[in-house]
Image (cartoon, helix red, strand yellow):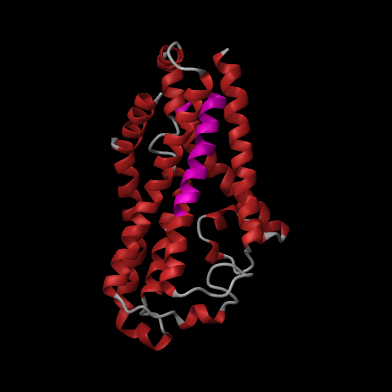
């Protein structure tokens, strides 16, 4: 199992889809932040020259919008491809179904998490070496920089929490994509369904007045000042439980 696990990790992380995902996140961040540099000299009066301000800005816009799709690009569709090609049956002759699924879940979650976390870490390194480490005046107006029920952290702690959150979101969304791959045995659904579900629940939460339950908060809690650690953790728990249930239940059904 160890050899198979290492091979799957290499397939997930040292692959063209993984690097494409990295490029897409970096491109989204770059395209979103470049227009604001035209006004950089004038932002000092608003306290918007600090590293934290630019770090938050990098995580908004295109990178955040398409993160549910990008997280599934590296490996979420792998089960559907292996099942339809007959490769999974070949592996299952030498490995138990539970071990096969465990390796698939782990390698897929790792790839989905890193494809979002690595660009976030690069962004942290860039802003901390380019801009001063001061909190933004704009952020001081909000009840919290990260969660409603926590005191605003220092800029470096905030950015570190955001990198961790990016990894968690990528791993969770990739697992949701793998569940779609197992359920429908279609690689297209593995990439699209997570984005569709996140978008649907985002609109429903907005129209129902329960904006705190917007699933995109899972990627960036700072976009909703009413998000708490409890609501944040609860959303992750629900998505993980649903994803794992679908993977376990329908994987066995499909393979049998």
User: From the image, which quarter does the N terminus lie in?
Assistant: top left
Residue at image point 67% right, 52% down: 204
Q: Is residue 149 visible?
A: yes
**Residue 155, position as x, y percentages in the image:** 43, 73
**Residue 142, position as x, y percentages in the image:** 57, 77
Judging depth in this view, the residue of 55 and 33 nearest the camera is 55
Q: How many marks?
A: 0
116 left or right, relative to 251 = left
Q: Main secondary structure of the magenta part?
A: helix
**Residue 147, position as x, y percentages in the image:** 58, 67
Residue at image point 31% right, 33% down: 10
Above or below, comparing residue 208 to residue 252 in the picture: below
Q: Is residue 183 magenta?
A: yes
Q: Residue furthest front?
A: 2
Give the magenta part as a residue range. 166-187
**Residue 32, position as x, y percentages in the image:** 37, 63
Residue at image point 50% right, 50% down: 169
User: From the image, which quarter does the C terminus lie in?
Assistant: top right
């Amino acid at each position: 199992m160890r050899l198979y696990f290492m091979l799957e990790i290499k397939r997930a992380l040292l692959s063209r889809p993984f690097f494409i995902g990295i490029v897409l996140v970096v491109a989204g961040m770059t395209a979103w932040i470049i227009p604001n540099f035209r006004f950089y000299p004038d932002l000092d009066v608003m306290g918007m020259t600090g590293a934290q301000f630019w770090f938050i800005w990098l995580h908004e816009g295109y990178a955040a919008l398409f993160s549910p799709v990008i997280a599934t690009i590296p490996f979420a569709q792998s089960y559907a491809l292996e099942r339809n090609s007959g490769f999974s049956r070949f592996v299952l002759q030498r490995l138990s179904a539970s071990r096969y699924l465990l390796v698939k879940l782990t390698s897929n979650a790792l790839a989905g998490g890193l494809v979002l976390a690595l660009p976030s870490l690069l962004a942290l390194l860039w802003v901390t070496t380019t801009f001063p480490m001061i909190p933004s005046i704009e952020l001081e107006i909000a009840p919290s920089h990260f969660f409603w029920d926590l005191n605003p952290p220092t800029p470096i702690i905030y950015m570190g929490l955001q990198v961790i959150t990016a990894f968690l979101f990528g791993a969770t969304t990739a697992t949701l994509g793998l569940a779609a791959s197992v359920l429908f045995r279609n690689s297209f659904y593995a990439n699209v369904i997570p984005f569709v579900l996140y978008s649907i629940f985002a609109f429903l939460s907005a129209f129902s007045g329960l904006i705190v339950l917007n699933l995109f908060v899972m990627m960036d809690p700072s976009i909703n000042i009413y998000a708490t650690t409890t609501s944040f953790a609860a959303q992750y728990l629900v998505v993980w439980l649903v994803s794992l249930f679908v993977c376990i239940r329908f994987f066995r059904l499909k393979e049998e």
